[in-house]
Amino acid sequence: MIIAFTYNVRHIYPDPNDLKSHKEADFDDPVTITSMIKHLKSAGYKVLPIEADEKAYLKLYKYRKKIDLVFNYSLGLNGRDRYCHIPAMCEMLEIPYTGSSPLTQATTMNKGRAKEILQANNVPTLPFQIFTSQDDKLKSTIDFPLIVKPVAQGSSAGITNKSVVNNREELDRQVAFILKTFNEPALVEPFLDGREFSVPMLGNPPKILPIIESDHSVLPKEYLPIDSLEVKWHFEETHEKNNLICPAKIDEQLKQKIERICYQTWEAQKIQDSCRIDIRCDSSGNPYVLEINSPAGMIPPDISKTSYFPFSAGVAGLSYEELLKEIISIAFKRYN
Ligand SMILES: Nc1ncnc2c1ncn2[C@@H]1O[C@H](COP(=O)(O)OP(=O)(O)O)[C@@H](O)[C@H]1O
Ligand SMILES: [Mg+2]
């Protein structure tokens, strides 16, 4: 069986002080890509690696008759809706692929659109405002403290200690930073300081894998209680997941609430095969959907022990290769 593996690779390691590195934070390190290809091969597949750059279409077109399935791990290179590029090419060429459709990919990567879809389906998510200029007036429905994020990035790109803002001056500064660094609008929403969970989902219909809690209480004082670029790519990597608890210790009532809103999110967004949903609670313990990760990061355990999805799958008893095989087999079933 020939699997085309589509991916994007970064050239600079994420550094909160290096603007260029924020733009690539969403991509994967070369060693991660090499290792994923190695694991796909040892899972028994013939692998055709295709970087999701400008030439990706030419390669997909050339090999379209030979490729059995595209394992889509790509995030896309250019444009604001880049996550949908490879799925759209696959549809055009009638090549089966893993993961969600172009529409779902575009409307999950754009956190504003994702939240509108959730709101329309009565899934709890925070009120928000999109800033296209730092002069935009703040709506009266949201109030400080707020968090400022790029509207369509992942992997904590653009999210640092400075992202949580307490007044108009800090808000202006952070909106300006997002507009300039990413050349895209900023999403502003209330900052919640309750517990944070991440929920991996797998299958059609999906099963929920062990929920991960990101325990901000163990972070050193200099870090705000958020999964910022610093925390995700520096603290977690050097502190061997002691801020990550899986399965999260939650009471049955909260667990059921979280699971329900994750299933509702899956339905609302018409997700396929897998995703990971980030949840944060308010101070009274009510969970809200922050965002949907599709594709979820899947860094192999030989490179990182803190990549949420494989970490949780491991807790559920699935090895990394079994996880890859499962994703491929459930995607195949959709086409048969
Ligand atoms: N509204 C919020 N309240 C509190 N923390 C938040 C909020 N939004 C984001 N965060 C923090 O920032 C992190 C990254 O934000 P997220 O929306 O998940 O973007 P990314 O796509 O970069 O993962 C979250 O894991 C969480 O710790
Ligand atoms: Mg996230």
Image: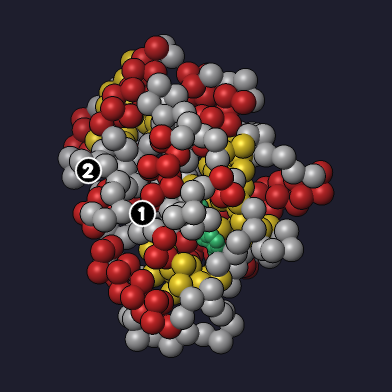
Q: Quadrant of the C terminus?
A: top right
Farthest residue toward the front? Answer: 221
Q: Which dot marks residue 157?
A: 1
Q: Residue at x 39, y 12 (%)?
A: 42
Hey, what amino acid is under mark 1? Ala
Instruction: Give residue 157's position: percent from left, percent from top.
Output: 36, 54
Determine whether 63 is above or below 233 in the image: above
Q: Residue at x 36, y 71 (%)?
A: 174
Q: Quadrant of the N terminus?
A: top left
Decide if residue 41 is on the left or right side of residue 121: left
Q: Which dot marks residue 86?
A: none
Q: Residue at x 47, y 61 (%)?
A: 111
Q: Secondary structure at mark 2?
A: loop
Decide if residue 73 is on the left or right side of residue 216: left
Front residue of 187/16: it is 16
Decide if residue 77 is on the left or right side of residue 192: left
Determine whether 41 is above or below 267 in the image: above
Q: Are marks 1 and 2 in contact (CB under 8 Å)?
A: no
Front residue of 245/57: it is 245
Front residue of 282/138: it is 282
Q: Residue at x 34, y 17 (%)?
A: 38
Tell me the distance, in whole angstroms, between the alpha carbons under discs 1 and 2: 13 Å
Instruction: Give residue 320's position: percent from left, percent from top.
Output: 49, 21
The first of marks 1 and 2 along the sequence is 2
Which residue does the numbered mark 2 point to in the structure image? 12
Instruction: Give residue 23's position: percent from left, percent from top.
Output: 27, 54
Determine whether 134 is above or below 323 in the image: below
Crowd band around label 1 with a 10 angstrom C-alpha radius: few (<14), some (14–19), many (20+): many
* Ligand 1 is within 8 Å of the C-beta of the residue at disc 1: yes
* Ligand 1 is within 8 Å of the C-beta of the residue at disc 2: no
Hey, what amino acid is under mark 2? Ile
